[in-house]
Image: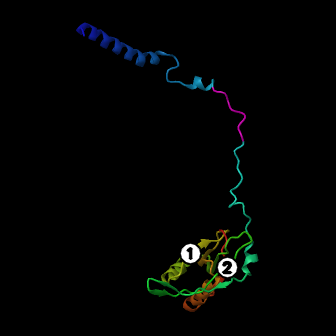
Amino acid sequence: MDEGLKRKLVGAGVLVAVAIVVLPQLSTTAGDASYLAKSVPIESNIPDMSMPLPKSLAIPMSQPSEVAMNTPEAVTQTDIKVDQQTLKLKAFQKPVLENTGQSVVWHIQVGSFSKASNAFELRDNLRKAGYAAFEAVSKDGAYTRVFVGPSTQKQQLEEQMLAIKQAFKIQGQLVVFEDQ
């Protein structure tokens, strides 16, 4: 290709690139896109997007006092043999079911304290002794309660409650676990 033709093509390309960059800057509306908002119509017919709760969240809850009186059915299992070793299985209880089919969950309320530091101290001592202890603040925020559990095995928690009474000299109370 001729050397002069190459230069003319490169020059034309540079002029086109400069025009693409510089000419929009010379426009009076350059950098201001607010004029575009006037051309966009405002949506007034917005569809309703509300949805019903999923079935699992729409199930009515039982009152804890209703199910607290139900006595769980004890189930006994025979020991099983695994790899030439016999595993001793303790008896467990079938969980008590609410009218929704959900298992009732229990825990032991060990104490209620107006000073949170006392609740944390008891919780830590129970944990050191091997109990699954946790604390929860009351709905009014005035008290911090200490619990052990939760479990669907009411009898197991009753045994733990007696052990806590002997070890810590605290009378616990077995209560149905409610969503805080």
Residue 90 falls inside the magenta stretch: no
Q: Which mark is residue 134?
A: 1
109 vs 23, left or right, is right
Q: Amino acid at mark 1?
A: Phe
Q: Amino acid at mark 2?
A: Val
Q: Name the residue furthest bottom.
A: 166
Q: Name the residue furthest left.
A: 3
Q: Main secondary structure of the magenta part?
A: loop
Residue beneath disc 2:
175
Q: Position of residue 165 (x, y in %)?
A: 59, 89
SS under mark 1 = strand
Whether 4 is drawn above or below 108: the answer is above
The residue shown at (69%, 78%) is 96
Q: In which quadrant of the rendered view does residue 64 lie? A: bottom right
* Residue range (magenta): 40-47
Image quarter (top left, top right, bottom left or bottom right) of the N terminus? top left
Which is more foreground, mark 2 or mark 1? 2
Quick one: label 2, few (<14), some, or many (20+) residues within 10 Å?
some
Q: Earlier in the sequence, mark 2 or mark 1?
A: 1
Image quarter (top left, top right, bottom left or bottom right) of the C terminus? bottom right
Q: Position of residue 178 (x, y in %)?
A: 67, 71
Q: Which mark is residue 124?
A: none
The residue shown at (65%, 75%) is 105
Q: Position of residue 39 (x, y in %)?
A: 63, 23
Disc 2 to disc 1, C-alpha distance: 14 Å
The residue shown at (44%, 15%) is 23
Residue 42 falls inside the magenta stretch: yes
Q: Nearer the viewer, residue 119 or 23?
A: 23
Q: Position of residue 106 (x, y in %)?
A: 64, 78
Q: Nearer the viewer, residue 121 or 114?
A: 121
SS under mark 2 = strand
